[in-house]
Image: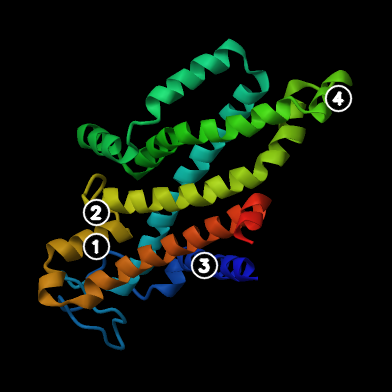
Amino acid sequence: MTRNILLRVSVAILFLYFAVALLAPFIAPYGATAIVGAPLQPPDSEHLLGTNNVGQDIFSQLVYGSQVTLIFGFCSALLSVSISTCAGIVLGYYGGSVDEVVCRVLDVLMPIPIFPLLIVLTTFFNPGVVQVSIVMGVLGSIHGIRLIRAPALSLAETPFIEGAKSIGASDLRIMSRHILPNLMPIVTVKFVTASQHFLVMGVGLSFIGLWDTMTVDWGSMIQNAYSGGALSLGLWWWILPPGLAVVGISLALALAGYSLEESFNPRLEVNRI
């Protein structure tokens, strides 16, 4: 019961975030970069979360910033999981020497931390948000390939797969119609956890200014508030809203991943009982 409640609460929170991002032009009263008031104006009826140091409406920035933040996190996760799933299924299904070589290469690449590597790459090449999202998705797929490969290898040796081969089913059909559906629980959990990981990582990269500083997202909002002295001046309405927004969606994704993992893995339920 508790697991189902957590899942429903997390899905409701995520739905709220996506609704805000999709309806941003209708929800935000001003443009994300429009100067609409006096600098450092506290919250009032005209500016629900006050203004920043240049007179921009913080509520509008928070709403529009959800678009970049969510797109970055979920697109990176989608690319990462797509690469991991395709490569893992192919390696697990065919096996052989190619599988051994790829696994040894993955063993070498897996210990490399993604975040410091992204800092180095963005420092030297100065990519945009789309480029960083692609690079993050590719790098993040390294761990997922091994995760998908193991159950795919086990499924490839099961009798029903051998039966499909014996009646002349093509390799592509077997992988897409028989192996992939059985891996969807793992893929789903991996996508949720990767979304949380990449979303927070994207906020961190934006906070330290490693992509276009003109892009309004939650990381740049926190960075601007921090560098503008929001903490020392006690301007809670400037730094607290984007921080709480990041914590809220990160917690929702964590709860969703936890709930789905227990739902898809009966052994966790047995151990908990």
In this figure, which residue is indicated by the disc labeled 2?
207
The outermost residue toward the bottom is: 45
- Which of the 4 image quadrants contains residue 55? bottom left
Which secondary structure lies at badge 4? helix
In this figure, which residue is indicated by the disc labeled 4?
163
What distance separates the C-alpha of mark 1 from that of mark 2?
A: 7 Å
Which secondary structure lies at badge 1? helix
Quarter holding the N terminus?
A: bottom right
Give the amino acid at mark 1.
Answer: Ile
In this figure, which residue is indicated by the disc labeled 3?
19
In this figure, which residue is indicated by the disc labeled 1?
222
Front position among marks 3 and 4: 4
Badge 4 crowding class, 10 Å Cα cut-off, few under 14, some 14 to 19, many 20 or more, is few
Q: Nearer the viewer, residue 35 or 62?
A: 62
Question: What residue do we see at 41% from left, 67% from top?
Answer: 248
- For marks 4 and 1, the one nearer the N-term is 4
